[in-house]
Image (tube, helix red, strand yellow):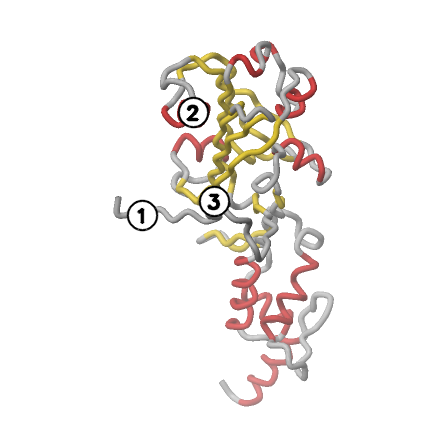
Amino acid sequence: MSRGRAVVFAARRYACPVEPGRIDRDAALPFYAQLKELLLPQLGSVWKVGERLPGEVTLCERYGVSRTVVRQALDELEGEGRIVRRKGQGTFVAARKVDESLFQSMTGLYEDVAARGGALVSAVRRLEFAPATADAARELEVEEGAPLIHLERLRYVNAEPWALTSTWLPHRVAPGLLDEDLTHQSLYALLEGKYGVVLDHGRREVEAVPAAPSVAEALGVDAHDPVLLLRSTAWDQEGRPVEYFTAYHRADRSRFQVHVRRRRRAGAPPSMLVHDSTG
């Protein structure tokens, strides 16, 4: 390419429309970090959730930066869960994750979402007596196979599938639960308000696991995609186990928020459990 043609090409390249804000070439902040800050306020406003962002070449032209800079900025945004890259399709605005505190407090998903102004609806897939699984029997201190109330719900937050939960309770805890409509109400509020259960404390664990095909289908993700598995056992004031549940949360929609202390009280169990994958 001749020098004259190169100058014309460069002028055409940088004359294209520029998004709000520009790269400050004299600033100490790296170009990719500046570009990230320029793109952030446009996610959800200029480009709505689920919409495709302009391609890398277009972003290079709009901001007058190299493709390496664009890719670094997009890498940062992807790492923070603000965008999703789909091979062969492009880059899309991701839905914002919901900060959930139910990992660290005796709240349910209904209460957690409501506290943040969201709307949660539950599709009740199962509400019946069922023989206790080994895990449910151990946590609720009953014989394996003993009849328990089994509640399975697919939870929708703002009309999107969010979590698939499987809850087990002894019949004595809520004798009339099989006749309740749990589509729009909190199980914990129902237990406390109608059945007089005084929840006192619990134990919860969370880990990342690959989604089984049935879980993936329910949550609208691909089989073997990572999901967050939450296991929880709750006790009442008398020290009796009253509820055990497992919940598969979409990893691209959920983020658990944990407050920590430097000092741990004497005798407290370890906060991190390491599983030996060698068996």
Q: Work out whether 76 lies above or below 181.
A: below
Q: Nearer the viewer, residue 275 or 211?
A: 275
Residue carrying label 3: 269
Mark sitting on residue 119: none
2 or 3: mark nearer the eye: 3
Q: Nearer the viewer, residue 277 or 140?
A: 140
Looking at the picture, how far across and down is residue 160, in whole percent? 59, 35
Looking at the picture, how far across and down is residue 165, in whole percent? 51, 29
Q: Residues within 10 Å of mark 2 (few under 14, many from 20)?
A: many
Residue appearing at x 64%, y 76% in the figure? 14
Q: Amino acid at mark 3?
A: Pro
Residue appearing at x 58%, y 14% in the figure? 174
Residue 215 figure quarter: top left
Q: Secondary structure at mark 2?
A: helix
Mark 1 vs mark 2, CA separation in Å = 23 Å
The tag earlier along the polypeptide, 1 or 2, is 2
The tag earlier along the polypeptide, 2 or 3, is 2
Residue carrying label 1: 276
Q: Are marks 1 and 2 in contact (CB under 8 Å)?
A: no
Q: Secondary structure at mark 3?
A: loop
Residue carrying label 2: 136
Looking at the picture, how far across and down is residue 156, in whole percent? 60, 31
> Residue placed farthest to the left in the image?
278
Residue appearing at x 60%, y 75% in the figure? 31
Mark 3 vs mark 1, CA separation in Å = 18 Å
Q: Amino acid at mark 2?
A: Ala
Q: Quadrant of the C terminus?
A: top left
Q: Amino acid at mark 1?
A: Asp
